[in-house]
């Protein structure tokens, strides 16, 4: 396996379109790193520059201590798994997995051993003689993974490999890939737009937006300590609630957003007063109380069994509340809410930068 280092990597297309700007990233040997962000944020472009499928305008990419900017993809010792399975329809699973090794002139005995070992790891040993048309989507994705595994590359690159699968199969396959990483101890870089995939699979996550890296951190730190409003809103499902306004004194500390006044917990110390700011709090960090706090009307109720989602409004801003279990409430009811002192975030209104640790 190998360490992957990106230093000020930039990709600019004709016409001044910048797809990725000054990307700096150090992926340790054997680490699983996920690039995540909305469509057009630059995550796939960054991965393709590591793979050699996109040229680099500025900066450098090194794999295993070797600068690979001018090295062909086939000579970078990487294996890539795409959203499209790209299997040869006329070949069996065995031949699909072995094809790249045959092109390299590897001995037949070695090829047979590698294919057999990979099939065993992925649980597709009984499928080796089938053609792709006789496989389900999840089985085809396993074959695509197997084709990468048999090459024994220095780095595995994944470009949204689960996008074509249904929800249940996505959950199963992300578990398979995580198990595969634990088994192989391989360096893996994984691209997805799904923040749930990122949070459950990555040892570290790179959040991107507008071609720039916003934050690189562990899943828990991204959740608990986002560096800006974008990261805070992107990580977590349902998304963090945001209120624009200012902190005021009104018989105690409160946040005024439009005509609404939200009492803030005792003991919470804000970094600024009487200046425009954004108050952020996650749906699971709002508590329902019988009295006190602040009132909010229920607009939509989603009972899910283990939890209930309430869609309410504070002033004119939609706010989501996640309550454990089933609750007795109905549309148009007024519920009383309080915020948790240790789970309040404050962001600069102009820049979006976090003002609280």
Image (spheres, rainbow, N blue to C red):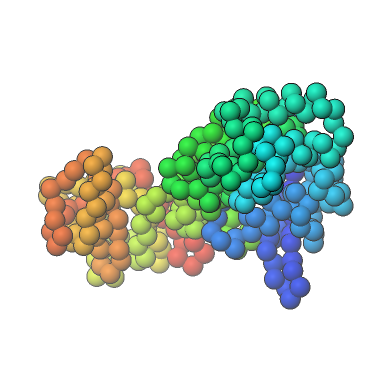
Q: Please say whether residue 180 is visible from this viewpoint.
A: no
Can you give x and y, in whole percent of width and height, for residue 236 in the image? 42, 49
The image shows residue 357 at horizontal and vertical percentages of: 47, 46
Q: Give the quadrant of residue 67.
A: top right
Percent position (x, y) of residue 66?
Answer: 85, 41
Residue 271 lies left or right of residue 175; in this view the side is left
Of 279 and 181, the residue lying toward us:
181
Give the side of residue 345 with respect to residue 298, left or right. right
On the image, the x and y values in percent for residue 287 come to 24, 46
Please name the residue shown 43% across and 47% down the image.
167
Residue name at image x 52 percent, y 38 percent: 173
In the rendered image, is residue 129 in sight?
Answer: yes
Nearest the eye: 223 or 86: 86
Work out which quarter of the rendered image holds the N terminus and state it: top right
Q: Residue at x 75, y 49 (%)?
A: 51
Query: Does residue 153 appear to the left or right of 135 in the view shown?
Result: right
Q: Along the line of sight, which residue is nearer the eye, 250 or 318?
A: 318
Rendered image quadrant of residue 44: bottom right
Q: Residue at x 22, y 59 (%)?
A: 300
Residue nearer the viewer, 65 or 39: 39
Residue 181 against residue 287 in the figure, above or below:
above
Tally the numbered discs: 0
């Amino acid at each position: 396996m190998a360490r992957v280092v990106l230093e000020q990597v930039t990709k600019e297309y004709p016409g001044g379109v910048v797809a990725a700007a000054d990307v700096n990233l150090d992926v340790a040997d054997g680490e699983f790193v996920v690039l995540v962000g909305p469509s057009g944020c630059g995550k796939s472009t960054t991965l393709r520059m590591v793979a050699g499928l996109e040229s680099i305008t500025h900066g450098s990419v090194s794999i295993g201590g070797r600068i690979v900017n001018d090295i062909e993809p086939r000579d970078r010792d990487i294996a890539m798994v795409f959203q499209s399975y790209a299997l040869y329809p006329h070949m069996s699973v065995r031949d699909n997995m072995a094809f790249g090794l045959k092109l390299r002139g590897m001995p037949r005995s070695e090829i047979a051993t590698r294919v057999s070992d990979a099939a065993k790891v992925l649980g597709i040993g009984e499928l080796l003689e089938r053609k792709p048309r006789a496989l389900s989507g999840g089985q085809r994705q396993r074959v695509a993974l197997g084709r990468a595994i048999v090459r024994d590359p220095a780095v595995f690159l994944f470009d949204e490999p689960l996008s074509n699968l249904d929800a249940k199969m996505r959950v199963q396959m992300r578990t398979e890939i995580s198990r595969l990483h634990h088994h192989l101890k391989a360096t893996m870089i994984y691209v997805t737009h799904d923040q749930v995939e990122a949070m459950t699979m990555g040892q570290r996550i790179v959040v991107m937006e507008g071609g720039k890296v916003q934050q690189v951190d562990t899943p828990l730190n991204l959740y608990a300590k986002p560096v800006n409003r974008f990261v805070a809103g992107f990580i977590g499902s349902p998304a963090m609630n945001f209120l624009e306004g200012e902190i005021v004194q009104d018989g105690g500390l409160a946040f005024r957003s439009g005509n609404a006044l939200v009492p803030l917990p005792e003991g919470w110390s804000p970094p600024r007063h009487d200046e425009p700011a954004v108050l952020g709090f996650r749906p699971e960090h709002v508590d329902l109380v019988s009295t006190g706090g602040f009132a909010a009307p229920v607009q939509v109720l989603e009972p899910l069994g283990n939890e209930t989602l309430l869609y309410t409004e504070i002033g004119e801003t939609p706010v989501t509340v996640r309550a454990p279990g089933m609750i007795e409430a109905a549309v148009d009811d007024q519920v009383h809410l309080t915020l948790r002192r240790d789970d309040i975030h404050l962001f600069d209104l102009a820049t979006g930068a976090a003002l609280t640790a």
